[in-house]
Image: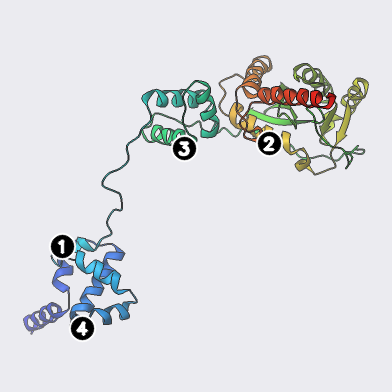
Amino acid sequence: MKGRYNGCTMHMCSKVPGYQRLASIPVLSKEARKRLKWFDYYQLHNRNARLTCRYFGISPQTFYRWKRRYDPHHLETLEDRSCRPKQVRQPTYSPELVAAVHGLREKYPRWGKDKLVILLRREGLACSASTVGRVLKKLRERGVLEEPLPNHISARKSQRQRPYAVRKPKDYVVKEPGDIVEVDTLDVRPLPGVVLKHFTARDVISRWDVLEAHTRASSHTATAFIDTLLERMPFPVKVIQVDGGSEFQDLFEAECQRRGITLFVLPPRSPKLNGHVERAQRTHTEEFYEVTDSGFEIAELNRSLVEWERVYNTIRPHQALGYLTPEEFLKHHQQNRRKEEVSLRY
């Protein structure tokens, strides 16, 4: 009885469409198994292709395309094929360009292809930004280019209330460099329990930045930063704009008044009104603090900041300035002003 039952079972299973084939084939993907059901249905219904297409909701073109590929003895033919072309375009850039891109990216690890292509053109290597992007991708795939890991050592301080604020008049128009220089501080945390204060001043027209670090942010250190700001800005500073931090009160306000510098103070909880310098803080965090090898002693750090400030203002292309540096922008601006003055005379 047992033998008859087993024999009957095997006989019944052998009548199931595709049973022997499915027992011997390798594992197929979900899409291949779905296509296999098409052709089983097709064989069981008198090879009626239109009926099969209607039943599975597929187009005749799709069915016949897979029917031409289908080999019952090799069910792997129902798997998707690679769409990669047989002939692939080979790189046309030179080894010299690859070496130059690699060197610049190692020197400036946070600069993208749009900035690097400007530096390459200065060195006489004409290429497009997309070419530089492909070179960077190849360098990463080869493991030659290692991207710096972010340290996340900075944290923004909270906005504090201020009992009195002088806001920027609504009719105040910014036209020339120095019309508004935004100043802000950034908390830098290189080690647990260690907090340094980074001061940034940015001119909203030329994007010229002045940087300095201190051990604390107080009205004394903020007042000292005014001296640094006026010394390194290549144009007269007419207005300084700050947020409501306590470091920009007391001595800082008195020093601005003594020097004849107008001071605009933002209303509480409105950092977006100081958007230029806020964006600058992110840039200096990503492109300097997260990749620098400098120690965090104040004297050494400020020497490194002076060098980075020079790179930022005279070498780094700025997208907002049409990929000019702040120094180049100021030269163009001065030339245009002279031309306007000459045209007004005559």
Where, by quadrant of the figure, is residue 46 drawn?
bottom left
Task: Report, in whole angstroms, how far the alpha carbon at label 4 lies from the one at label 2.
Answer: 68 Å
Mark 1 neighbour class, 10 Å CA radius: few under 14, some 14 to 19, many 20 or more: few
Mark 3: secondary structure: helix
Task: Report, in whole angstroms, how far the alpha carbon at label 4 lies from the one at label 3.
Answer: 55 Å
Residue at x-position 84% and y-position 37%: 173
Q: Is residue 265 left or right of residue 15?
A: right
Q: Residue at label 2?
A: 279
Q: Residue at label 3?
A: 130
Where, by quadrant of the figure, is residue 335 drawn?
top right
Relative to 272, does residue 41 appear above or below in the rendering?
A: below
- Report if the CB atoms under discs 3 and 2 are less than 8 Å apart: no
- State the image coordinates of residue 324 (x, y, percent, origin top left): 63, 28
Q: Mark 1 or 3 closer to N-term?
A: 1
Relative to 45, does residue 344 appear above or below in the rendering?
A: above
- State the image coordinates of residue 20 (x, y, percent, origin top left): 13, 71
Does residue 193 appear in this view? no
Task: Report, in whole angstroms, how far the alpha carbon at label 3 lies from the one at label 2.
Answer: 26 Å
Task: Report, in whole angstroms, how far the alpha carbon at label 1 lies from the one at label 3.
Answer: 43 Å
Q: Is residue 114 left or right of residue 172?
A: left
Q: Residue at label 4?
A: 45
Q: Residue at label 1?
A: 74
Mark 2: secondary structure: helix
- State the image coordinates of residue 216 (x, y, percent, origin top left): 76, 24
Mark 1: secondary structure: loop
- State the image coordinates of residue 313 (x, y, percent, origin top left): 66, 23
